Image (cartoon, grey):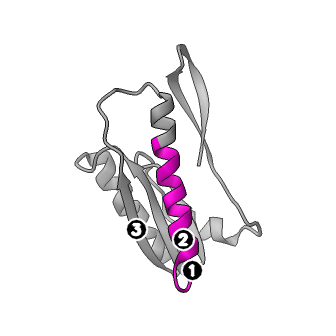
Amino acid sequence: MNILAGGPTRETASECFRLHSLGLEAQAFAADAQILVQHNVCRDHEGPRWTHDKFERVGRVRQDFLDMATSGDPPYDALFMVDSDVVLGPGVLARLLEVDADVVYGVFWTECDWGGSVGVYPQVW
């Protein structure tokens, strides 16, 4: 099975990103798959507040991943998109591949300031 994995990232030098990358690469062993890890860097220094431009930029990166996964020759068997600040435990991808569905997503609850309203909000991948 060939899987395209990755997602948009703001930076690649942090300890969190290093752990994220190690966790993502380790998924190949548990899933018995060949995984191409691709990160598209979306650099900005505007802080954590989401603007329309940020939504558009991240949306384009995610669309690029979808296009890359479906236009290969042959196309990838699966696409695994995950934020670069998520550290994956062992076997996450293998468990997701066992689900009998075309689309599987995870919901992460994050405390943040979403448009001036501070609280706990879902982030969906």
- Residue 19 in sight here: yes
The image shows residue 117, relative to residue 50, as above or below, that is: above
Residue at 73% from the left image edge and 66% from the top image edge: 102
Amino acid on which disc 3 is placed:
Val
Q: Do the residues labelled 2 and 1 touch (CB within 8 Å)?
A: yes
| Quadrant of the image occupied by residue 75 | bottom right
Front: mark 1 or 3:
1
* Residue 94, image x, y percentages: 59, 70
Tell me if mark 1 has few (under 14), some (14-19) or many (20+) residues whose alpha carbon lies within 10 angstroms of its own: some
Amino acid on which disc 2 is placed:
Ala
Residue at 37% from the left image edge and 55% from the top image edge: 40
The image shows residue 80, relative to residue 105, as above or below, that is: below
In the rendered image, which residue does mark 1 sit on?
Answer: 75
* Residue 116, image x, y percentages: 53, 13
Helix, strand or loop status at disc 3: strand
Q: Give the range drawn in magenta.
A: 57-74
Disc number at residue 69? 2
- Residue 91 in sight here: no
Instruction: Find out whether residue 115 is within the magenta segment.
Output: no
Disc number at residue 37? 3
Amino acid on which disc 1 is placed:
Pro
Front: mark 3 or 2:
2
